[in-house]
Image (tube, rainbow, N blue to C red):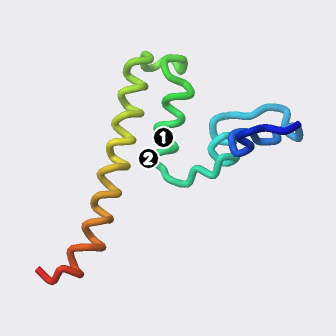
């Protein structure tokens, strides 16, 4: 079968089931903050302990932290080179 966006599809025919952790592995998510946000979004409001809005806010918070970390890393790379 031909698909326009093959990177969105993974063969899971060898598995009986998949969970959030398998999805993260299949799509090679290797950043903890991004993985946490994806887990929150996939299960928003259905885990029993938090409602959908709380889970989505926590996903947003995780992604904001990811952005902060990227900025921290950028500053660590640039500032030493500026010799301030």
Which residue, given by chain and number where applicable, does mark 2 sit on?
33
Are the residues at dot 2 and dot 1 in contact (C-beta closer than 8 Å)? yes
State the image coordinates of residue 74 (x, y, percent, origin top left): 30, 65
Residue drawn at x 54%, y 17% is 46
Figure check: 77 above or below 22: below
Observer-nearest residue: 7 or 77? 7
Figure check: 39 above or below 47: below
Figure check: 75 above or below 54: below
Figure check: 54 above or below 66: above
Q: Quadrant of the C terminus?
A: bottom left
Instruction: Locate residue 58: give its quadrant.
Output: top left
Image-based side of 41 in relation to 12, left or right: left
Q: CA distance from mark 2 to mark 1?
A: 5 Å
Q: Secondary structure at mark 2?
A: helix
Image-based side of 71 in relation to 83, left or right: right
Image-based side of 28 in relation to 32, left or right: right
Residue drawn at x 69%, y 40% is 8
Image-based side of 37 in relation to 42, left or right: left
State the image coordinates of residue 15 (x, y, percent, origin top left): 84, 38
State the image coordinates of residue 61 (x, y, percent, origin top left): 34, 37
Q: Secondary structure at mark 1?
A: helix
Q: Quadrant of the N terminus?
A: top right
Residue drawn at x 27%, y 71% is 76
Instruction: Locate residue 80: give its quadrant.
Output: bottom left
Label disc, if present, on residue 28 of the rendered structure:
none
Which residue, given by chain and number where applicable, does mark 1 sit on?
36
Instruction: Locate residue 51: give its quadrant.
Output: top left
| Residue furthest out toward the left | 84
Residue drawn at x 39%, y 18% is 53
């Amino acid at each position: 079968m031909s698909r326009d966006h093959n990177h969105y599809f993974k063969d899971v025919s060898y598995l009986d089931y998949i969970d959030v952790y398998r999805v993260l592995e299949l799509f090679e998510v290797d950043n903890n903050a991004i993985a946490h946000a994806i887990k929150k979004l996939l299960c928003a409001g259905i885990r029993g302990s938090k409602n959908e809005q709380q889970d989505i806010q926590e996903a947003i918070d995780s992604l904001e932290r990811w952005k902060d970390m990227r900025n921290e890393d950028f500053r660590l790379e640039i500032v030493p080179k500026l010799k301030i």
